[in-house]
Image: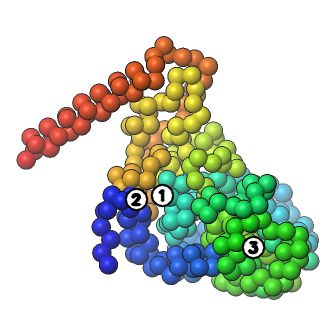
């Protein structure tokens, strides 16, 4: 079937066309039926991409921990998460908008989803493992909403096998929509399905799916780069909006600015939100899932000044205008701009 730009579908129409180009239709089915999916290396990127990300992580570990940052004895019986990796190396920035990973995240969360965290997992030999759990962020809820709120993408920088301490899933558990109990975790610890896949693969899942990992029985380190994406209204786990620089925005495409959430309407101050800034933002850098806000997964052109960091606002200041007055002025400006564009098009024809 030909996917047209139906307004009723919004930005999911162009997204689906691009997911088809990437050959990810079966991955969508797996997300729906199983709650997780594995994208093979050939659909993620060339081998050099995986190697470059791994080398970037190795350099980071040596900076953080010193000369023995990759020594096997340091990581014996350790499975540790490395926080706030994004600004450690530009390769990590590129991973956040990899077409396969971001495309499936946008399918689950909407095409204006934001980046919540970029972390790494380093795991050494031993009995340590991750217990079975779900990623829904409100542990107080017994029955979880049907809609996925956040999703994970793990980029495997080493081969994943059962003996290598791979990640594991309980297929179909996303439909149960509840937290894991201690007895659940114990029951599924050795019954969960191991994900065995080569380096360069991605595994993606939504927040409802139960998962864990197995102990690593082989020598060496298991290494993973993790990106977690969230619906725009949620609070991110790491502070990208406050730490992204103009240089980082310039060297990455426009969609990266959207992942940084620098054009968010929130939080409000006394003078409401910055209507002029948000209205003028490039498609793909702000909220909204209309067709005209879609940014192609294949758009890798550096933004080079088309996006800017969030200004420092004085939230306690009121500019003396009522919200209705401000909105009316903005609508009049939009009408003028629309008329000018229409006149320009007519003049050319």
Residue 5: where, in percent of width, then height? 31, 62
Q: How is the image coloured?
A: rainbow
Name the residue carrying label 2.
Answer: 11
Q: Are marks 1 and 2 in contact (CB under 8 Å)?
A: yes
Name the residue carrying label 3.
Answer: 211
Instruction: Let me know if residue 142 appears in the view.
Output: yes
200 to the left or right of 194? left
Answer with mark 1 or mark 3, whichever residue precedes in sequence: 1
Q: Under tag 1, what secondary structure?
A: loop
Corner quadrant of residue 21: bottom left
Where is the N terminus found, in terms of image quarters? bottom left
* Marks 1 and 2, how far apart at CA: 7 Å
Residue 347: where, in percent of width, then height? 9, 40
Corner quadrant of residue 324: top left
**Relative to residue 83, is residue 56 depicted above or below?**
below
**What residue sits 63% from the left and 79% below the top?**
34
Answer with mark 1 or mark 2, whichever residue precedes in sequence: 2
Residue 25: where, in percent of width, then height? 47, 78
**What residue sits 50% from the left and 81% below the top?**
26
Q: Under tag 3, what secondary structure?
A: strand
Name the residue carrying label 1.
Answer: 111
Front one among 206 and 166: 206
**Relative to residue 346, is residue 206 depicted above or below?**
below
347 to the left or right of 53? left
* Marks 1 and 3, how far apart at CA: 25 Å
Residue 79: where, in percent of width, then height? 84, 68
Q: Residues within 10 Å of mark 2 (few under 14, many from 20)?
A: many
Q: Residues within 10 Å of mark 1 (few under 14, many from 20)?
A: many
Q: Name the residue at the front extreme.
A: 143
Q: Under tag 2, what secondary structure?
A: loop
């Amino acid at each position: 079937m030909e996917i047209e730009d139906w307004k009723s579908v919004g930005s999911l129409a162009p997204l689906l066309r691009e997911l088809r180009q990437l050959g990810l239709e079966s991955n969508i089915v797996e997300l729906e039926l199983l709650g997780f999916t594995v994208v093979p290396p050939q659909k993620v990127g060339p081998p050099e991409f995986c190697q470059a990300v791994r080398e970037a992580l190795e350099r980071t570990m040596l900076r953080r921990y010193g000369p023995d940052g990759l020594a096997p004895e340091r990581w014996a019986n350790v499975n540790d998460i490395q926080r706030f990796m994004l600004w450690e190396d530009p390769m990590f920035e590129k991973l956040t908008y990899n077409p396969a990973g971001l495309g499936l995240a946008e399918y689950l969360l909407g095409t204006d989803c934001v980046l919540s965290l970029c972390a790494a997992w380093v795991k050494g030999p031993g009995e340590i493992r991750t217990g079975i759990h779900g990623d829904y962020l409100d542990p107080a809820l017994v029955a979880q909403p049907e809609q996925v709120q956040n999703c994970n993408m793990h980029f495997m920088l080493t081969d994943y096998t059962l003996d290598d301490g791979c990640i594991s899933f309980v297929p179909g558990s996303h439909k149960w929509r509840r937290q894991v109990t201690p007895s659940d975790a114990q029951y599924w610890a050795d019954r969960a399905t191991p994900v065995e896949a080569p380096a360069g693969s991605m595994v993606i899942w939504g927040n409802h799916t139960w998962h864990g990992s197995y102990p690593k029985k082989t020598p060496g380190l298991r290494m993973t780069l993790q990106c977690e994406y969230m619906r725009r209204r949620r609070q991110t786990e790491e502070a990208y909006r406050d730490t992204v620089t103009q240089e980082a925005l310039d060297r990455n495409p426009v969609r990266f600015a959207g992942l940084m959430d620098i054009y968010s309407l929130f939080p409000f101050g006394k003078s409401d939100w910055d209507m002029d800034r948000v209205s003028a933002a490039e498609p793909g850098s702000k909220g909204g899932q209309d067709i005209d806000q879609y940014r192609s997964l294949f758009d890798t052109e550096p933004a080079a000044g088309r996006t800017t960091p969030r200004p420092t606002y004085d939230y306690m200041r009121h500019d003396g205008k009522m919200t209705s007055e401000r909105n009316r002025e903005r609508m009049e400006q939009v009408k003028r701009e629309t008329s000018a564009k229409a006149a320009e098009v007519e003049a050319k024809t």
